[in-house]
Image (cartoon, rainbow, N blue to C red):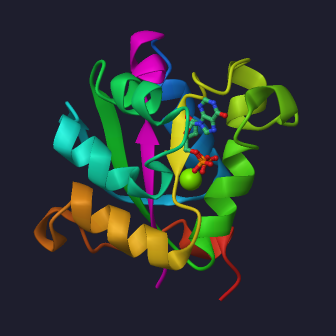
Amino acid sequence: MDRTLVLVKPDGVQRGLIGEIISRLERRGLKIVGMKLMQVSGELANRHYGEHEGKPFFAGLVGFITSGPIVAMAIEGNNVVGLVRTTVGETNPADSAPGTIRGDLGVDIGRNLIHGSDSDESAKRELSLFFTEGELVDYSRDTDPWIIEA
Ligand code: IDP
Ligand code: MG
């Protein structure tokens, strides 16, 4: 079963959009298997966004993601990385279609509300930064047959 990491970024928390964002993921039928409110340290931010080190926006990005609490979620399901990315929208909210989280709720690339891992490999790496295996809950939903054809 695939898993991915979602973060409600500090702008989402500050704007009172935690529920709105989680609700959109839930309504799509995505299954949350881990969740916590936390403060990201500089060290964790540097590791999570390591691939962007050296880019002009890196310092601002690390400053932003550590500027206030975030909500981290682990989401599980077949092809869940892609499902989350299409629900999230493009990196720049200005380019994101209406109906996506970034397209409906944001306007600026530096305040784009939510993170979703971009591949299965990234998801594995990022999930291990934010969650221990023991923090992820194994359970089934009675609604699954109404969401996924067996
Ligand atoms: P993604 O979040 O859609 O996967 P990435 O290219 O992985 O986008 O970039 C990580 C984060 O860095 C973005 O979500 C955004 O917050 C920030 N970012 C990316 N490109 C820019 C930029 O050109 N200016 C400012 N911030 C950027
Ligand atoms: Mg990315």
**Magenta segment includes 5:** yes
Q: Position of residue 59 (x, y in %)?
A: 41, 30
Residue name at image x 29 percent, y 54 percent: 47
Q: Which residues are magenta?
A: 1-15
Q: Dividing the picture into quarters, in which one does residue 62 lie?
A: top left
Residue 148's place in the image compared with 85, above or below, is: below
Instruction: Report if residue 35 is visible in the image.
Output: no
**Magenta segment includes 48:** no
Q: Position of residue 132 (x, y in %)?
A: 15, 66
Q: Quadrant of ligand 1?
A: top right
Total residue callouts: 0
In-image side of 129 versus 52 (left or right): left
Pick whichever, 149 or 113, lies toward us.
113
In-image side of 56 versus 96 (left or right): left
Residue 94's place in the image compared with 140, above or below, is: above
Pick out the residue farthest to the top: 15
Residue name at image x 45 percent, y 25 percent: 60
